[in-house]
């Protein structure tokens, strides 16, 4: 397994406040990685740095082994990183089609959009990539969708454009149980098609089921990075709740 | 539902998250029509369009029954008032509306019109109207870009920044011209081209239609229009997909500025003069035209047809009230009510949509 994305010694400070301290890890090809941690652990900042929306104060970013000097969203977009931010992946006032093709519109030489073609493809995406209950037409505004439907549309968009790394920020928080199950299965399947994913979640049971590896963050530091077979839900819980101290106690006492 | 193999889909055999119910998608013509109506409604122009049609039917009906008391359809009214007032406000409404969709305001519009019109008159008097037109549009673009740069790079709310700059540009007009009117002669001005009288209709109408068509293609069909909606609707979603919001907003400011410059020429050629501080009313009227036409005050929603209907509604209501000899105060009262009504409708559309 070779590394798709590797970040080394990432530090991020906002004024006097250090939110990430010397964080290093890698995401391999064909891998689903769980990024876990309590609120304020630094997960969101890490996600923003990985997707190029926020600059790291210090640290390096490697893609397929090559260092990326200027990490910005245009660059990560080119590399194939797609982040589905919680609640902010789509524009509610725009149609599903326009959201799917936002920034990647199919146009003629004058830059005018080929809406018919875009609608047809959008409909096909909705039908066969990630079909979602109750969507009448790809022309429907995203504001008329439920949270779960919107989330699924955002995921469908990422899948359609064949991204190589999918970062999902709390993707299951808005989904119903059935849709969550399906989404998690789907991530496993994408792995087989060469798309790696990072699943940021609070829900350890969701994460444990599908992730090949788990990274636990605590107060801006990486405190655990283990393959699924080398850890357990209990150990991960101890790490998320108790931090490094929690892991130590869990390993000594078998509980925390 | 049969799987479509377009070859563009990542994996046709992928297991669906949740199956689509076939009944959800309408197949009858009426079903499709109702569906489409919902999409129109979502853009906020439907309700006000109905209000507009009802008002026009009432006024036209009254004008046919009592043409003497209510000469709404009189050629003098059509060409003298309606087809001069509506297009200017319509063009300004389009400029402000597009800017508002991107999530910004420009409250220096009234001052900018005076500045651009004075530039047009002075440059035309010094050389010819072609150069004058170019100077007016260039002034509009430069003023809007200065406003835009201030807003985009300092992150000051555009409401405040452009309110302040409005006073600055008003002062600049007086600096350029002094407080007296700036005049031009009819023989130097392209009167026929810009405000020519064709019986019941004026040249301004053709200009508005031409601008509306270009603006429609830009906003509703061009890639850039999609980015304007994206930036105004959800800036973080736009950024996440690598759209640069600052660039989109600056280009939108420039488009708005060029329309302000052009509208100022239509105003100057109509009156053949311009006095600093005489065009302040246009600021809020243009915002009102956009809002009445369904443009969201929060950005992300609106349509070109709505902006024109908004301008037409305000100006025809204004005209109708003048024709029944309503007092000036009542005119303000009704136009004010109309704006509040439109804002309430907008709010409800937004509420029901989210």
Image (tube, coloured by chain):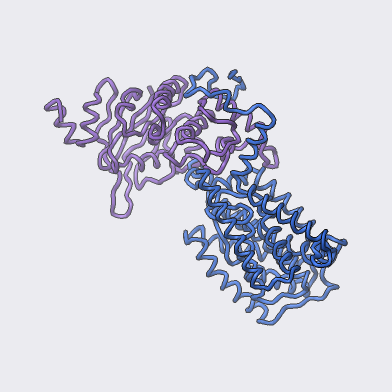
Chain B drawing hue: blue
Q: Quadrant of the C terminus of chain A?
A: top left
In the rendered image, the vertical position of residue B52 relative to residue A171, given as above or below: below
* The furthest residue to the left: A253
- Could you say which quadrant of the image residue A255 lies in? top left
Chain A palette colour = purple
The residue shown at (12%, 27%) is A252
Seen in the picture, residue B74 relative to B215 is either above or below; the reply is below
Give me the residue at 41% from left, 29% from top. Answer: A176
- Left or right: residue B201 versus residue B142 is right
Report whether residue B269 is seen. yes
List the single residue furthest toward the front.
B65
Q: Can residue A29 be spotted in the picture?
A: no
Image quarter in which the N terminus of chain A is found:
top left
Q: Is residue B19 left or right of residue B325?
A: left
- Position in image of residue B242 (x %, y %): 51, 42
């Amino acid at each position: 397994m070779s590394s798709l994305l590797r970040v080394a010694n990432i530090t991020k400070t906002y004024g006097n406040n250090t939110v990430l301290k010397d964080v290093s890890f890698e995401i391999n090809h064909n891998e689903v990685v769980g990024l876990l941690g309590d609120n304020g652990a630094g997960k969101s900042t890490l996600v923003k740095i990985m997707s190029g929306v926020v600059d790291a104060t210090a640290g390096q970013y490697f893609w397929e082994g090559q260092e990326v000097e200027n990490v910005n969203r245009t660059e990560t977009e080119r590399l194939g990183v797609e982040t589905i931010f919680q609640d902010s992946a789509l524009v509610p006032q725009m149609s599903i089609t326009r959201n799917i093709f936002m920034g990647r519109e199919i146009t003629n030489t004058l830059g005018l959009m080929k809406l018919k073609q875009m609608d047809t493809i959008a409909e096909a995406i909705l039908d066969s990539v990630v079909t979602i209950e109750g969507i009448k037409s790809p022309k429907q505004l995203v504001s008329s969708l439920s949270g779960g439907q919107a989330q699924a549309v955002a995921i469908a968009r990422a899948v359609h454009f064949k991204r190589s790394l999918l970062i999902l920020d709390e993707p299951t928080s808005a989904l119903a149980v059935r849709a969550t199950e399906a989404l998690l299965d789907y991530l496993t399947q994408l792995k087989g098609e060469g798309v790696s994913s990072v699943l940021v979640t609070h829900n350890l049971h969701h994460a444990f089921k599908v992730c090949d590896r788990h990274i636990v963050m605590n107060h801006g530091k990486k405190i655990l990075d283990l393959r699924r077979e080398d850890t357990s839900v209990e150990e991960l819980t101890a790490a998320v709740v108790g931090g490094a101290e929690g892991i130590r106690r869990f390993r000594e006492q078998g509980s925390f | 539902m049969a799987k479509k193999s377009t070859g563009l889909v990542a994996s046709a055999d992928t297991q669906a998250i949740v199956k689509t119910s076939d009944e959800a998608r309408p197949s009858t013509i009426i079903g499709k029509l109702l569906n489409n109506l919902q999409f129109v409604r979502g853009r906020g122009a439907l309700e006000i369009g109905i209000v507009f049609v009802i008002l026009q039917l009432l006024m036209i009906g009254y004008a046919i029954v009592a043409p003497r008391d209510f000469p709404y359809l009189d050629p003098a009214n059509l060409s003298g008032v309606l087809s001069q007032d509506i297009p200017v406000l319509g063009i300004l409404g389009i400029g402000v509306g597009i800017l508002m969709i991107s999530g910004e305001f420009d409250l220096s519009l009234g001052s900018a019109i005076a500045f651009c019109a004075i530039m047009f008159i002075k440059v035309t008097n010094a050389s010819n109207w072609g150069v004058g037109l170019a100077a007016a549009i260039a002034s509009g673009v430069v003023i809007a870009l200065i406003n835009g740069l201030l807003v985009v790079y300092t992150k000051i709310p555009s409401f405040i920044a452009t309110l302040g700059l409005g006073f600055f540009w008003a002062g600049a007009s007086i600096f350029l011209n002094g407080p007296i009117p700036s005049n031009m002669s009819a023989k130097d001005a392209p009167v026929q081209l810009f405000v020519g009288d064709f019986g019941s209709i004026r040249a301004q109408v053709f200009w508005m239609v031409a601008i509306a068509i270009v603006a429609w293609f830009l906003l509703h069909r061009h890639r850039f229009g999609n980015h304007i909606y994206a930036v105004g609707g959800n800036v973080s979603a736009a950024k996440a997909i690598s759209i640069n919001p600052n660039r989109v907003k600056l280009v939108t400011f420039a488009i708005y500025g060029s329309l302000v410059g052009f509208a100022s020429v239509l105003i100057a050629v109509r009156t053949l003069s311009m006095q600093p501080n005489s065009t302040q009313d246009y600021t809020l009227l243009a915002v009102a035209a956009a809002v009445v036409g369904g443009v969201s005050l929060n950005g992300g929603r609106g349509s070109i047809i709505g902006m024109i209907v908004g301008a037409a509604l305000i100006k025809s209501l204004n005209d109708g009230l003048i024709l029944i000899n309503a007092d000036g105060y009542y005119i303000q009262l009704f136009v004010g009510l109309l704006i509040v009504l439109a804002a309430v409708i907008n709010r409800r559309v937004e509420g029901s949509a989210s």
